Amino acid sequence: MIQSFPVYDIEGNAYECGLSHGEQAAERVARTIEIYLPAFTRQVKLALTEIRERARLYATAIKDLDSEIMQELEGIAAGSRQKVEDIVAVNCRTEILYGSLAGTRPATECTTIVALPEATQDGGMLVGKNWDWRNACVGSIVVLKIRQSGKPALTLIVEAAWWAATP
């Protein structure tokens, strides 16, 4: 059976997009957090306080790298009424789940493919991505149609709570 996913239109600057994402998908954002926080504890044996401390460190690095990504994450947290540390932790799941296991277990997640214009029949670009992570996450998936100020419009499928800012 094919499951349909909610589609949310969001637009504005990075914070406004995050806020809209968080407000519209609040229940699914909560579900995403409910999936990952216990996974961190179970798989990497981290207490909730340790997870949130790591998330604060990642937040500093994210802000230094691209402040708009951090603004979007803060917007998602505000809109969904979740802790910003939990939103950051979810977005840094690979680093938290596999970073401390350095080379002992590969992170197996999604695959992205691109067909450039010269490879397509109509000269357009095609982009595709499979999502083959955890079955429990299916109930937290959303489709975001994003029009962020000064950036290209895009549509993507993500787990609620994931940043979607375009470069």
Image (cartoon, rainbow, N blue to C red):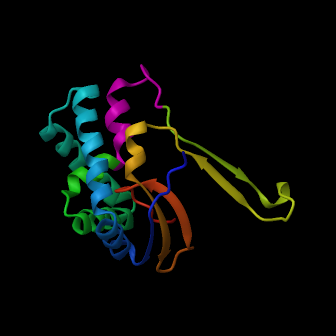
Q: Which residue is drawn at 74% across and 61% down?
A: 125
Quarter where residue 65 is shown:
bottom left
In this rendering, does residue 58 appear at all?
no
Q: Is residue 16 left or right of residue 166?
A: left
Q: How many labels does the image show?
A: 0
Relative image position of residue 2 (x, y in whole percent): 55, 49
Q: Residue at x 37, y 51 (%)?
A: 140
Nearest to the observer: residue 21 or residue 167:
21
Tell me if residue 114 comes above or below residue 78 in the rendering. above
Relative image position of residue 7 (x, y in whole percent): 47, 66
Nearest to the observer: residue 60 or residue 165:
165
In this rendering, does residue 128 appear at all?
yes
Residue situated furthest front in the rendering: 1
Relative image position of residue 34 (x, y in whole percent): 25, 44
Q: Which residue is drawn at 24% across and 27% down?
A: 42
Residue situated furthest right in the rendering: 121
Q: Please identify the quadrant where the N terminus is shown.
A: top right
Relative image position of residue 44 (x, y in whole percent): 27, 27
Q: Residue at x 25, y 69 (%)?
A: 79
Task: Tell me which segment is drawn in magenta.
Answer: 91-107
In the image, residue 130 lies in the stretch drawn in magenta: no
Tell me if residue 152 comes above or below residue 101 in the rendering. below
Residue situated furthest left in the rendering: 49
Nearest to the observer: residue 98 or residue 6:
6
Tell me if residue 23 comes above or below residue 41 in the rendering. below
Q: Is residue 116 left or right of residue 53?
A: right
